[in-house]
Amino acid sequence: MESFRNWFFRDAAARWALGGMLAAIALFTAVASAVRVGATETFDRHLLLAMRRPADLQPLGSTLFHALEVQPAELEAISRGDAFSVLLRRNLVTGATTMFRRTLLDAALPFAPEWVHDEWLAAIAAATGRMDVLPEPTIDYRQHASNQIGARRLTLSEKIAKAFAERGDKHVARLHRADALLQRLLQLGDRVPAAWLEAQRAKVAHQRFRAGLPKARPLRLVPILAEAARGRYARFGRGGHAIAQDLLERG
């Protein structure tokens, strides 16, 4: 049905403002919503990412993008149609803040079990078309102790504790995620630009490197510096943050 061409996500802790919904719909229907890739291929805008704003009961004075420490360069890259490069580094998409075209599911289903649904939809949208951002906060989000993920900025002490945490199997899990996305992009054939396929292959190689780092910290230094010199920490992670994490994590 025509009325169900565009879908909004929502969760129990969030609510879309009417103005935000109308702004999202207007952006989706604008003529500028198509981006041309190469000489002949034209893709519709598949997914829209909106900012959270704090709930009106006790405002926290921040937004989701503030909590994620989103940089202006990341938003600029998304605006010029380079969202896939941004998502190669980290996810910025939260389900409750997104609207997407029904046709996106043609490429996204079935969801990869290694991925959270909203992150998966964002990656597929960015790889096969375009993702955009509404800079103005458009939904209210209620932060409380039972949020599954939440939207709180980490303190300095929490960041330090995270850097010294156990490595565990998280890097192996990230490798599996990266490979699952690569396999889907390969299945989608010419719907995915060759540049994104090569980028995802390189991301898989980087995640394989990180998953294979030795347990002993001193033995990690030289290979980490070599990987950093190749530019992969900056291209596929948060640069210095990721380097520090790989140098300092236990086990």
Image (spheres, grey):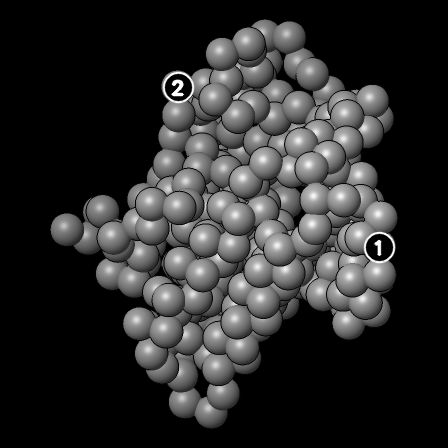
Q: Residue at x 45, y 18 (%)?
A: 13
Residue 190, horizontal then vertical, whole percent = 36, 81
**Could you classify mark 1 by the number of other residues whose Cα lies within 10 Å: few (under 14), some (14-19), or many (20 or more)?**
some
Question: Mark 1 falls on what kind of element?
Answer: helix
**Could you classify mark 2 by the number of other residues whose Cα lies within 10 Å: few (under 14), some (14-19), or many (20 or more)?**
few
For this rendering, which residue is in front, 26 or 216? 216
Report the residue marked by disc 1. Answer: 221
Mark closer to the chain start, 1 or 2: 2
Q: Residue at x 83, y 22 (%)?
A: 157
Asked if the residue under mark 2 is in contact with the one under mark 1, i.e. CB atoms within 8 Å, the reply is: no
The amino acid type of the residue labelled 2 equals: Ala
Q: Residue at x 59, y 36 (%)?
A: 168
Q: Up-down: is 16 above or below 131?
A: above
The amino acid type of the residue labelled 1 equals: Leu
1 lies left or right of 49:
left
Question: Mark 2 falls on what kind of element?
Answer: loop
Report the residue marked by disc 2. Answer: 12
Name the quadrant of the C terminus: top right
